[in-house]
Image (cartoon, grey):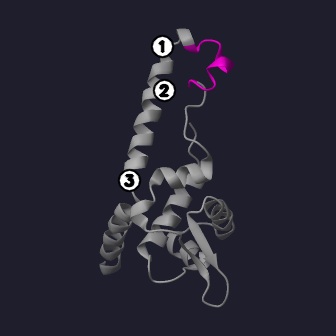
Amino acid sequence: MRLTAKSEYGLIATIDLACNFGLGPVSAREISERREIPARFLEQLFVSLRRAGLVTAQRGARGGFKLSRDPEQITVLDVVEALEGPLETSVCDHERASGCGRSASCAASSVWSKATRALRDVFAETTLAELAGTQEAMDDRTSVV
């Protein structure tokens, strides 16, 4: 299993879109500046998120990106897998067990499998709507200071 900056920044960007859900498109530049995500990297992430059907793009002066469906219906797992591919262990999984040769006699295999299941469960249970609510509360706190 490998989570990279793609997942971190992609999740931050989609949370930002969830905070603005229903208010129209948000420009990548705005998100980049507000969330301190490198603009070119963010543009690459939006390509993958669009391909996965999680965001849509609108061209023009008032263009930008928006979530393709309600944030209640998009999970962290959806975002992570759109950017990283299927979440699975790096070596010790059943689909690739033939590549290892030791998986049937390796005590670590069950630990990696449990860890992957636990991570998938947390990601699958957490929606962008939940995270957007938390982000908005945090943003309110920092703007008061």
* Residue located 40% across and 41% down the image: 121
Which amino acid, mark 2? Answer: Trp
Tell whether position 94 is magenta.
yes
Q: Is residue 129 above or below residue 59?
A: above
Choose top left, top right, bottom left or bottom right for residue 61: bottom right
Secondary structure under tag 1 reads loop
Tell whether position 136 is magenta.
no
Q: Position of residue 58 (x, y in %)?
A: 63, 80
* Residue located 53% across and 12% down the image: 106
Q: Is residue 21 left or right of residue 145?
A: right
Q: Position of residue 76 (x, y in %)?
A: 46, 53
Secondary structure under tag 2 reads helix
Q: Position of residue 70 (x, y in %)?
A: 43, 68
Choose top left, top right, bottom left or bottom right for residue 140: bottom left
Between disc 3 and disc 1, whose residue precedes?
1
Q: Which mark is residue 112?
A: 2
Which amino acid, mark 3? Answer: Thr
Give the residues in magenta: 92-103
Give the class, few, some or many, for how many residues have Cα within 10 Å of label 1's Cα (few <14, many ≥20): few
Secondary structure under tag 3 reads loop
Which amino acid, mark 1? Answer: Ala
* Residue located 53% across and 55% down the image: 79
Q: CA distance from mark 2 to mark 3?
A: 21 Å
Q: CA distance from mark 1 to mark 2?
A: 10 Å
Q: CA distance from mark 3 to mark 1?
A: 30 Å
* Residue identifier under label 3: 126
Q: Position of residue 12 (x, y in %)?
A: 49, 63
Q: Which mark is residue 107?
A: 1
Choose top left, top right, bottom left or bottom right for residue 120: top left
